[in-house]
Structure formats: structure tokens, C-alpha cells
Amino acid sequence: MAEQKKILLSGVKPTGRPHIGNYFGAMKQFVDLQDSYHTYVMVADYHALTSVQNKEDMKSLTHDLILDYLAIGLDPEKVILFRQSDIGVHTELAWIFDCITTMPYLMRAHAFKDGEAKNKEINVGVFNYPMLMAADILLYDAEVVPVGRDQKQHIEYARDTAQKFNNLFGETFTLPQDLIIEDVETVPGTDGQKMSKSYNNTIPLFCSDEELEKAVMSIVTDSSGELPKNVYAIHKLLRKEEELRRIYEEKKGKYKELKEMLLDDIKKIVVPMRARREEFEKDPERVKKILEDGAARAKAVALAKMKLVRETIGL
């Protein structure tokens, strides 16, 4: 008898154009893991509402994100791809969790503390999002949730909430584990800082060849005569380090040639993905069907869980 696959869930906010840092830091892992787990990938549009508050922006960002994930190789036959807002019980379960959660506990969340430190006027959605995230995870009995080290707290909140609910009402929720991808380091941007849209230092994942060339050739290099560390740090995501060491030694000081080689290596990955994205973009009915199927499969699981939760708390 074949061993049953563990349930994996990840949510992605539709907040902007992806770059190669997003790809190597998270997106690629979903594709790599889709054969090993029973996988849910959720477009977290309710979470995005904390910052995206324009109708047309929300529609276009959500649509673009779905195309991006299909383009990088998520297989709808293997992965349940769905929009969070298509499954209304996410917010119902979040409210139930709100009622067993204290404000001081939520005030320990990194996002809240960061906003408070910067004297930001924090909306209730930002304050409360750990409970919606817990609902996202626990509705599907997710056993593993892939996250970066800086996001580990999200899973701790989900585990704590599951444990508290189970203690109050009886065993209902699976306690999730984080899945930290150990060999993925922070991807540097063109200026050497962490690649981020807020730093304006990204190499876009889906863009024209001209835009890609402009970004790669703008990578800041040192003039010490040793290997250009920013170029090298990005390049080692694409080639084995022993091979790179030899090449960079042979071409020491030839920064333009090394950048051109990096550009060629990036193109080998992104050009086929760009072509797949264009194919999906030309076939909106196919994309619509994938989302409808994903929502139907996710909803069946979520509604069954919510029926159990309501019975458990006496509703």
C-alpha cells in the first residue's frame, strides 16, 4: 500500500510583479514539492486587501499571479490552485479564532511590532492577519507549510491557535509544521541588498529581453580585482559553485563577460516560462476552468471542516 502524501499548503499575496528573488526564494519550491505532497496553493487575495485597495489593481494583480504560477510549472493535475476569496469560510473560521485569542498575543506579531515601531497607522486587517492565516492553514489540515526563516512565526501562531482550540473544544485541528528550505539563501538585488521591489533593485521574472539585459548589466560590481560578489551571488543560484569558481577565476576582472554569461543563464530559465505564460494568457477559458476546479476541490474540504467546527463549538 502506497504511503499517503502529507498535506502541504502555501498562500501567496497578489501584490506585484515577481522577480527572480521571489522565484528562487519561494516559487520554485512549490514546483519542486508538488510531486511529494498533496499540495494546496492559495492566492491570498483577502490578505492583500490590507494594502491593495483598488478594484482594478486587485483584479489585475490576482490574474497576473495565477498566470505566473502556471507559467513556472505548477501543474493543476497535481496542485489545488485556488483564490482565497472563493472559499468564504476562511473568514468565518478566522472570526471563531478571534474569539479565543487575546490582543496582547496578537501584539507580539512581527508585522504589528514593525508597524508600531515605525509609527504607522495599522489597520485591523494587519493586526488580525495571523488569525486569518491560521484559518487558511487549519481549514485544510495542512501538515507542512513552506516558509522562509523570517516567516516561521506565522506557523507558530497557527500551531498555538490549533492547540488552544483543541484544548477548549476537543481534538479538531492538525498541528502544522513549518518547512524551512535550508539551502535557499537571501537572493541579493542588483545593488547587493536583499532583492526587493521596495529597494528598486530587482531582476523581473517576466519581462522583455531588453529589460532583463538592462537589469543584469546594472548589477553593482566592486573593483578589488576579486570575483564580483553581487554577480556571483546571483549566478550561484543557476550553476554549481565548483563550476562557477573555475569560470570566475578564468575571467577575473572581466565583469562585462561575467554579466553576459549570467544574462544567458537567466534567459535559459525565464524564456521558456515566459512562453508558457503567454500561452495561458491567450486562453482565458482554460485559466478560468483551472480556478473553478481548484475552488471546487478546496471548497469540499473546507466546508466539511467547517461543519465539524460548528458542531464542535455548538453552533
Image (cartoon, grey):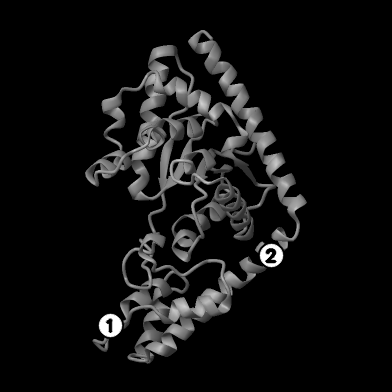
Percent position of residue 32, x then y: 54, 55
* Residue shown at the point (24%, 43%) measured from the top left: 119
Residue toward you, 227 or 194: 194
Residue at the disc numbered 2: 278
Residue 210, compared with residue 56, is above or below; it is below
Residue at the disc numbered 1: 222
Percent position of residue 31, x then y: 57, 55
SS class, disc 2: helix
Task: Give how far apart the Cα atoms at labels 1 and 2 are.
Answer: 37 Å
Number of disc labels? 2
Residue type beneath disc 2: Glu
Q: Residues within 10 Å of mark 2 (few under 14, many from 20)?
A: some
Quarter of the image with the C terminus in it: top right
Percent position of residue 156, x then y: 35, 35
**Closer to the eye: label 1 or 2:** 2
Q: Residues within 10 Å of mark 1 (few under 14, many from 20)?
A: few
* Residue shown at the point (69%, 47%) measured from the top left: 77
Q: Specify which label sits upstream in the sequence, 1 or 2.
A: 1
